Amino acid sequence: MTAESAAPEAAKRTAALALAALGVVYGDIGTSPLYALRECFSGPHGIAPTPANVMGVLSLIFWSLFIIVSVKYLLFVLRADNRGEGGILALMALVLQRPKGSQAPRPGRPLLVVLGLLGAALLYGDGVITPAVSVLGAVEGLSVATPVFKPYVLPISLVIFLALFLVQRHGTGGIGRVFGPFMCLWFLTLAVLGVKELARNPAVLGALSPLHGVQFFMENGGHGFLVLGAVFLVVTGGEALYADMGHFGRTPIRWAWFGMVLPGLMLNYLGQGALLLRDPGAARHPFYLLAPSWALYPLVALSTVAAVIASQALISGAFSLTRQAMQLGYCPRMEVVHTSAEEIGQIYMPGLNMMLLISVVLVVLGFRTSSALASAYGIAVTATMAITTVLAYVVARERWGVRRALALPVAGAFLGVDLAFFAANAVKIADGGWFPLVLALAILTLMTTWKRGREILGTKLRVASMDLWALLDSLKGDHPPQRVPGTAVFMTSNPEGVPPALLHNLKHNRVLHEQVVLLTILSEEVPHVSPEERVEVVPLEQGFVRVIARYGFMEHPGISDILKRCREQGLQFQLMSTSFFLGRETLIPAKKPGMAVWRESLFSWMSRNARSATSFFRIPPNRVVELGAQVEL
């Protein structure tokens, strides 16, 4: 292919990816017009829709979108990719990576780890509230059409949530193909609705001047600062730009934003503002009142589908985030179902799906309206954005070599904006903002407890283990154990020591297989490991072979893949004559516990409910032998 023909092909591919990004990346931020401007003027801290206030709020909306999304995320944060992958945990893993050849501890890393985990935990709160507020905000359009529908808004929303979570098991591949074109229609609809009203009052375009925002704060003081918490609703979903970078790449995401999303959003917000200048009473629902009466029901249907798409993106993001946490060692093993043979990123997690459904239903029943939910919305996202800024600054300094004189002022400016929004949203804590914070604290506790518990358990097992070379020397003695035909695979987290299951097998059965494979599966702090580096086979003495398999935090390890790559390196065996020996530890309290008693109890509970290694690594159940041991934690 010539360079002349390759360029159009590349442009077509980028355009196709940009269209697909509309349906996944921009679903959340694309549904903000349903409720954002309404909350500025009729929410708990709403301000009177006077001409000066309307122009000031519109100015704040435009500059918030420009500074946070256009500049911070699209121009700067998207550059902080971990081998093409983005998101708070990918960024944290990038910060933790040591320079090649360095083993020295790096100062400040424990604090950065806690910040990264807190950001991930806060995203779960966002993942629960976003579907609730988006779908409720869309269905509430029925009550704008006629009050008759008002009692049915909540039941209809619950039915939509139930259907949404039930279809997750079928995967998003088929639905995903129409997400992009549909969201393209949605953003065009936003633009058309806005232009219709904007044509009647083009003077509202003057709100793009930052002077209106400055004047708004000067005239309204503290009340104006509280309104900033509602203004922030227009940028919720900005973190998704970064989290979904690995699916589409930074260029298509930028194309979609500047080519369609930003123009569609701003035209709609300006149109809503023009409507408020003409009719301040429209503040109760400026989005739906933009539409003519004949178009209201189709617009409600269109909005509901857009809200479901936004919810789908958050649900899929929660699945991906949890898989990353499992691979990085911060979450117990959970069932992961791959719903597509072609796309490795399309997964379904039944346990997490059920927990999300229960959480969303409880949130909807507890808050009941999108306005009440908007009061709880924002606090988690602002905190996550601030954490992203801090971690991105570390990456800029250490990975890119940016001088402090340049990196610090830029990061400081972004952090100042993040903290201003956080402070404005902090007043929502008493009105429901406590919910995502409590949820995040609970998830952070679970993640840190699991990580610390596994570290303590690993140390205990290593202390009780035997040096591998000492075992191999003992097998050369006068009374070696009986060798039986076949292959035994012993899974172990310590590639240097002897697996406890092997020692128990020798002690109780007094036999060894002709071929003994010591299998260690390691999770790397990179999203993907190349196939050439995936499996390392090291022949030892006495029929022993050490196999080390490495997987990235975006990959799911499986025994069939490992065995295939072992065969490619000359390690031959028959699966039906191979036995897999797994250790199962029973945790008992220690006289001197390694962590607080309540955390020990929590870790034990998580261990008992974690998915077994047999099903997680997809080992044939009829080839597995489990050997138990009691371990003091």
Image: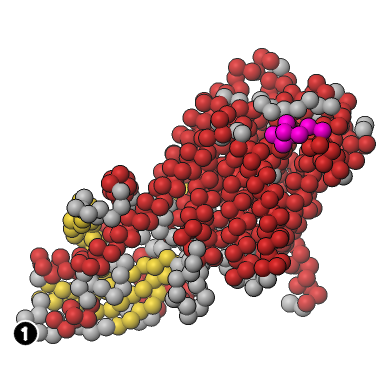
At label 1, which amino acid type do we have?
Asp
Q: Residue at x 38, y 80 (%)?
A: 569
Q: Residue at x 73, y 31 (%)?
A: 223
Quick check: 254 left or right of 83? right
Q: Is residue 16 magenta?
A: no
Mark 1 is surrounded, within 10 Å at the Cα level, by few (under 14), some (14 to 19) or many (20 or more) other residues, namely few
Question: For numbered disc 1, what is the local secondary structure?
Answer: loop
Number of numbered discs visible in the structure rendering: 1
Q: Quadrant of residue 131?
A: top right
For residue 556, above or below residue 447: below
Residue 216 visible in image: yes
Q: Which residue is mark 1?
A: 478
Q: Residue at x 23, y 68 (%)?
A: 463
Q: What secondary structure prevails in the magenta region?
A: helix
Q: Quadrant of residue 372?
A: top right
Q: Residue furthest top?
A: 148
Specify the segment rendered in magenta.
219-227
Residue in front for this viewpoint, 125 or 8: 125
Q: Quadrant of residue 221?
A: top right
Residue 297 at what x, y percent from top left? 73, 26
For residue 286, above or below residue 149: below
Q: Residue at x 33, y 69 (%)?
A: 520
